[in-house]
Amino acid sequence: MSQRAVTTPKIELSSIYKAFNLGGRREAVLAGVDIIANAGEFVSIIGPSGCGKSTLLNIIAGLDDADAGIVQMDGDPSSMRLGSIGYMQQKDLLMPWRSVLDNTVLGLELHGLSKKQARLRALDLVETFGLKGFEKQYPLALSGGMRQRAAFLRTMLLDQDVILLDEPFGALDALTRVQMQEWLLELWESMKKTIILITHDVDEAILLSDRVYVLTARPGRVKMVLNIELPRPRDYKSVTTREFTELKSILLTTLHEENSMPAWGKLEETNK
Ligand SMILES: Nc1ncnc2c1ncn2[C@@H]1O[C@H](COP(=O)(O)OP(=O)(O)O)[C@@H](O)[C@H]1O
Ligand SMILES: [Mg+2]
């Protein structure tokens, strides 16, 4: 028998359970979730609104604890993940009273860098993040796409191996969203980070991912794991290929089964 190379996953979730008090009752939100992201992989999680996706990312990031189950980073169940995983939450959380540049350096400052050193590091990357010329602007003066890129830059500046992204493009118009997806693809291909993305956009999940996990309605469990073996590098033209359409059909059918509610994508957008 041939020997298979055994690699330790970067992030491994095993049987994650979580319950919250909802409407006076203790209700299961996550009911045994297993997910793996290997080093350098792009993994997406998709599922109905309220099925526990953001809760799951909070648990991976170390901001919240699971009631049961194991989260391992590099095979270590007791790793200190808080602070060693980059996390871009569902809202961009930019501070309106700080300039774009000073928003992006916030994480570095919290890690003890002087403002001057932090700004120098950020200035190196403002062009890559499409923010050149806007460093001194305030968030309210920026378009949605730019605010999102500023939040991305703040997350990426910390240079962590694992990045969690919670519906980063959910609030953007369709055209900006496509541009941002292509931009993120290029960025990821050059930076080789492990990314776990939550999205409700099926095209986005397929275009970006090596693997897509579909969760059930609350309480969330993994309903399907879909490997996306489309060739890379990919760009938006990939969505017109037959292989893409087939994957999309599988995902949409699976999601549809989980959604008795119509237009849940819209509900998700108002759920912020
Ligand atoms: N800190 C909390 N306390 C109580 N209930 C919560 C908390 N966080 C999330 N919930 C509830 O858990 C469920 C899952 O939430 P969430 O993880 O945000 O779902 P998703 O991101 O998939 O839309 C929702 O019903 C939400 O109201
Ligand atoms: Mg959410």
Image (cartoon, helix red, strand yellow):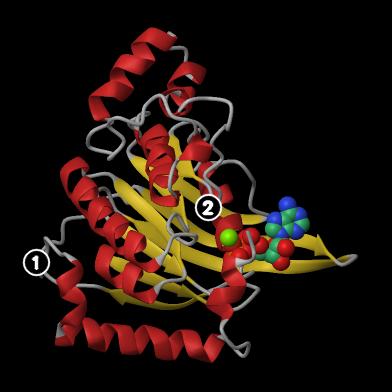
Q: Residue 123: percent from the left, percent from the top?
A: 28, 22
The image quadrant where one finds ligand 2 is bottom right
Observer able to see residue 88: yes
In front here: 132 or 38?
132
Q: Residues within 10 Å of mark 2 (few under 14, many from 20)?
A: many
Q: Residue 143: percent from the left, percent from the top?
A: 43, 47
Residue at (24%, 88%) from the top-left corner?
246
Q: Which residue is mark 2?
A: 57
Relative side of 70 to 104, left or right: right
In front here: 97 or 80?
97
Mark 2: secondary structure:
helix
Q: Amino acid at mark 1?
A: Ser
Looking at the image, the residue that sits furthest to the front is 141
Observer able to see residue 74: no
Q: Amino acid at mark 2?
A: Leu
- Occupied quadrant, residue 236: bottom left
Q: Residue 124: percent from the left, percent from the top?
A: 24, 24
Mark 1: secondary structure:
loop
In front here: 92 or 63?
92
Q: Which residue is mark 1?
A: 2
Quarter that holds the N terminus = bottom left
Pointer 1 or 2: first along the chain: 1
Tell me: residue 56, above or below residue 101.
below
Residue at (50%, 50%) from the top-left corner?
71
- Occupied quadrant, residue 264: bottom right
Q: Nearer the viewer, mark 1 or mark 2?
A: 2
Tell me: residue 82, above or below residue 136.
below
